[in-house]
Each structure stands twice: as C-alpha cells, then as structure tokens.
Amino acid sequence: MSHPDYAISYQPLSTTLQSLDIQALIDQAGDPWCNQTLIQVGDVLVRLGVMQDEFHWHKHDQQDEFFLALDGLFRIELDGANTIELRPRSECATRSADPSSVSCSPAARGRRYSRQSRRMPLPR
C-alpha cells in the first residue's frame, strides 16, 4: 500500500563486511514512517524503522517478522487479540504460518526507532 507519509525502501543499503551509521539514518529520516532495508542476509531482510503515530492495518501472509524496540514505546495492535507493547530493548516476533496470525496496526508514541527483520519467502 502506498501512502504519502510512508517512506519504505526494500533496497539494501549495505552488503556483508560493510558498516552503516544507524544514528545518521535515524537523523535523516524525515517522514512519519520510514522503513529502510539495511542488509539482506540469506532470506532475511534486516530493516530499520523510524516511526511516529499509527500505521495502517495490514497482514503478512507469507512473511515472518521480528521487532526489536530501540527507543520509546512501540505498540502492535492486533485484530481480535491483546495489544503487544514493546519498550526499549524488548522484542516480539510474528509468524505467517501461525494460524492465530491476525491483522495488525503498529503505533509509536512520539518519534521511535525499531529494528525489524523479515523473512522473505524463498523462490521455488
């Protein structure tokens, strides 16, 4: 889904044996929701999210996700289930194969940063 306040890039910024200045990426993020792929390791995309306020409801049918909150409060509101609250240095994972997997709407109070990993389906 495209939205004028979302800046989402799946193009990795680095490859193996390269370093990135994550703080510089956070400082450069200008949109309310910036989601940048840092690197792809095997079938996993390691991403940085710089976000504030709410994101639209959505579901990943073929992607597992891992969230690690770096700063602030990051909430994952679940349709028909309890809301998950991530505080700094806490994590949560979702699985696409889990039958209890439901739609979610992430939300962040103020400007917050998280690291995300997403397993992409392998081509068959």
Image: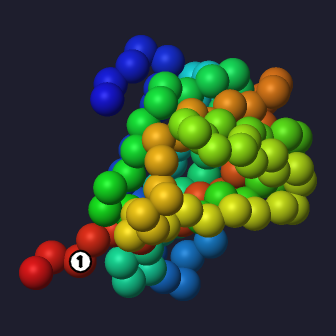
Residue sitting at x 87%, y 41%: 72
Q: In the visual, does 7 lie left or right of 20?
A: left
Q: In the visual, does 93 lie left or right of 12?
A: right
Quadrant in which the N terminus appears: top left
The image's colour scheme reads rainbow
Quadrant in which residue 21 is drawn: bottom right
Residue sitting at x 34%, y 68%: 120
Label 1, residues with CA under 10 Å away: few <14, some 14-19, many ≥20: few
Looking at the image, can residue 34 be seen? Answer: no
Where's residue 49, x and y in %?
61, 45
Looking at the image, can residue 108 be seen? Answer: yes
Q: Classify mark 1: helix, strand or loop.
A: loop
Q: Report the label total.
A: 1
Where's residue 58, x and y in %?
42, 37
Where's residue 2, x and y in %?
32, 25
Q: Which of 72/81 is in front?
A: 81
Quadrant in which the C terminus appears: bottom left
Where's residue 91, x and y in %?
75, 63
Callout 1, which amino acid? Leu
Residue 14 lies, with reference to residue 102, above or below; the image says below
Quadrant in which residue 75 is drawn: top right
Q: In the rendered image, which residue does mark 1 sit on?
A: 122
Residue sitting at x 57%, y 39%: 80
Q: In the visual, does 31 lie left or right of 59?
A: right
